[in-house]
Image (cartoon, helix red, strand yellow):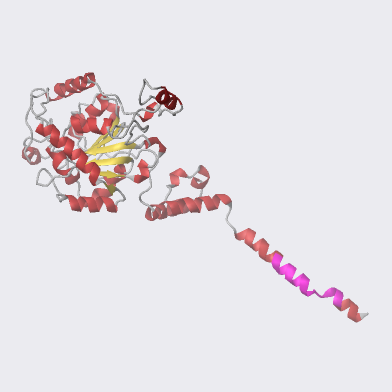
Amino acid sequence: MASHDISRRSFTSFQVILLICVTLVFQSIWNRPTGWENAVQISNQMGISPERQTSSVASASTSTSTSTSTSNTMINPLSIQEGQAPNLPSIIVEDKELEASRKIYGGKGDGKHLGGFTNIDMHGISPAVWKHAVEKWTVQSVLDVGCGKGTSTSWFYTHGVRTQCVEGSHDAIEQSMVPDKSLLVEHDFSRGPWWPGQTFDAVWSVEFLEHVNLQFHYNYVSAFRKAAIIMVSSSRWGGWHHVEVHQDPWWIQKYESYGFRYSKELTDEIRGVAKSEKAGNTIFPVNGEPFGAQHIFMSMKVFINPVVAALPEHAHLFGELGCFTDYGKPNRKCGTPAKPGVKKSVAAAAIETPLDPSFFPLVLTDAQDQAWYDIVKASIGDDTETPKE
């Protein structure tokens, strides 16, 4: 009887094993992160910014939020920033000696690292290049960085290209010719980073890179990161606050280290267009001078930013008609017969899916050119002086 009581109070081997298994299962469930926590961990590993996570994560403690933001930036600085960063305008200074040293350059009240703009720089503007980007690369939006008085921004604006102009010089902003002042952003990149609220098809930045010290690259590269195509020139000689004068290989290596991909093909293509414009002695009706485009055909470099270029809203870039016409002939618009008089060709075209109209290039007109001429003429008057740097 005693022996029987003892056996009833003790555990069998099976019961012990079962108890251990149940304990392990409960421990696993208790310690396992929830589906949402897993999503947050994965997003952090992929470099998705905290702003892309929902408000439930933002409601965590300040220390946790700060830690997540910092670690995220360290893991992937190539991520696309959400929203528009607050702009930091330039600080106005009073320096008579500095103003006297500017000579032909604008920048009254600007610090010495700013200014250096002219009424118009015939070496830095190229309607032929802009038209090529719109018609051949299907560019529909451009962020103009270091836009000066807005000569190039005004061209984009009058030709139906969604655009925004960011400039550090307060004097340049005050004199800006851009008709829609809401497109202007005054920001001094030596004071901190800035980026636009939307992504753009392209960045246009001419006579800007050489003016910004290396320690401030992150501040303007943050803006470049919100464009699919980056078109930049860099000076090869001295000038007003030219503090980063380097040959092309240096810039290419630097920008590729920032995650951008250099395209020799697109670079050669755009330089070739600028060279042809100069060789053709194309005259600007506003001042009677030829478009020199020297900064462009000598030093413009084209990079692709895959992070933005891969977004569906930029899928229209580098558009090309996709339906076969004949060997050795350009493709045709899908839905249109290769041979209108041949029934078989007409029938084949009838089953083709047409390309969405938003994927076609913007239509450029002479009236748009004239609107740009009028804006520039009203801004520069009779000034025909081109800087020699």
At x 19%, y 37%, the residue is: 169
By secondary structure, the bulk of the magenta-drawn segment is best described as helix
Stretch of the chain drawn in magenta: 7-21
* Residue occupying image coordinates x 54% and y 53%: 38
Residue 234 appearing in the image: yes
Position of residue 245 measured from the top left corner of the image (x, y, whole percent): 14, 49
Q: Which residue is at the front of the view, 120 or 201?
A: 201
Q: Which image quarter is the N terminus in? A: bottom right
Residue 17 placement, left or right of 335: right
Task: Say which quadrant the C terminus sits in.
Answer: top left
Instruction: Assess whether residue 277 is covered by the magenta stretch.
Output: no
**Farthest residue in the right direction?**
1
Residue located at (73% from left, 71% from top): 17
Question: Residue 93, located in which quarter of the rendered image?
Answer: top left
Q: Is residue 16 magenta?
A: yes
- Please give the count of numbered marks on the rendered protein: 0
Q: In the figure, 146 relative to 30: above or below?
A: above
